[in-house]
Structures are given as C-alpha cells and as structure tokens.
Image: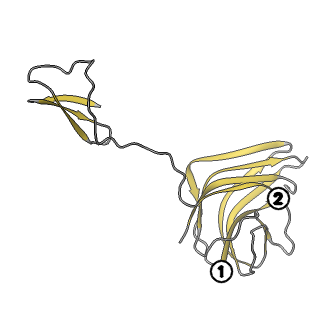
Amino acid sequence: MSIMRLGFCWSVAIAFGLTTTILHAVGTDPPASVPMLVTGVVGTVPLLPTNAFTIAPTQSSVAYGGGYAGSLTPPDPSGTRYAISSITVTNPTSTAGHMNFSAVAFSFTVFTCRFVVDEIARAYGPTLYVLPYTTAQLTFPQPYITEPVDGPQVCMGQDNVGLNGATWSMVGYKILP
C-alpha cells in the first residue's frame, strides 16, 4: 500500500490498483489515531476449482481381459481432461513397481470407473515408481493436465507393473469439454 498527498486529500493505492481517497485538512498529515475510511478493497475467498475431484484411497488390482482399474467414481464425458494436483501411492508389498496413471476412453458402458474394458483411446499421465513397504507422494505445484480423450465414456485410473495390492489416491479437478 502506498500513500501520497494530492492537494486537499490523501490517496491510498491498494494492492490491486484500486484507489481510496481520505479527506484531510490542507497541510496536515493524517494522524495515526484517526480512523481511515477505506473502500473498494478486493477481498479473497479461497475456493475449490469448479469440478474438483478426490479419488479416495483405492486398492490397485488387475482387471480381467487386459482392462484398466480406476475408482468407484462415475465416468466422465468425452473430451474430459484431468488437472492432477497430487497423487499418493502406498505399497505394503515386498515388491517394487510402477504405477501408470492415465485418462482412458472406452466403449463398454459402466456406472463406475472401477474396472474398464474395451479401451479405444488413452491420454498418458504421470508414472510413479514405488519401493517396497513405502509411500510415495507426487505433488504438482502447477497441475499436471492430461490431454483430452474422445470416446463415449472417460475415466481416470491406473495400471501397474508389480504393485498389485498397493493403494493409490488422487486430487485435482476436471476440465470438462
């Protein structure tokens, strides 16, 4: 905030470039004990982005028929992109492995993204390598945004190599078409 004298008044410049004028007698400095009227201040309210999502901790598994394992969330529309803020993977097993995250479009009608088959398109996301008996967390200061995926239904989920039994969760927001 900066204060400058402009003839018969004082002008206060606030962080967002707004200006408030406070009247005072000519030739006097604003006394510290006099309340100053300030209007036009822009307040901030922390809000979640629209379409924010949290995929609760979900145990990884192998879907039958070369499928893809997601969560119990419902599928999203064609063209959805995912802005991923963070991913956590807990590996309680004695085997290290990779967990690959991606958005997948598929033709088979489902009500949740838990097990997906008949994949027709994929947008690859981050991959985490997790050591045995550890938890890995990946946080993006600026969200990781997947490419849009076209198909009747789209899900965010994972496939893995060597991490059956691991648990994963994800936080972010959806960019709907």
Q: In this figure, which residue is indicated by the disc labeled 1?
A: 152
Disc 2, SS: loop
Residue located at (11% from left, 24% from top): 25
Describe residue 74's horizontal placement relative to residue 69 as left or right: left
Q: Is residue 166 above or below residue 121?
A: above
In the figure, is residue 130 to the left or right of 46? Answer: right
Position of residue 112 measured from the top left corner of the image (x, y, whole percent): 75, 70
Classify mark 1: helix, strand or loop. Answer: loop
Viewer-proximal residue among 19 and 105? 19
Q: Residues within 10 Å of mark 2 (few under 14, many from 20)?
A: many
Q: Amino acid at mark 1?
A: Pro
Residue 119 on image: x %, y %: 73, 76
Q: Is residue 155 left or right of residue 64?
A: left
The circle on residue 65 is: none
Snapshot quadrant of residue 26: top left
The residue at the point 57 percent across, 61 percent down is 51
| Structural distance between the alpha carbons of marks 2 and 1 | 24 Å
Counting from the top left corner in percent of width and height, residue 9 is at: 13, 30
Q: How is the image coloured?
A: secondary structure
Which residue is at 70% across, 60% downward? 101
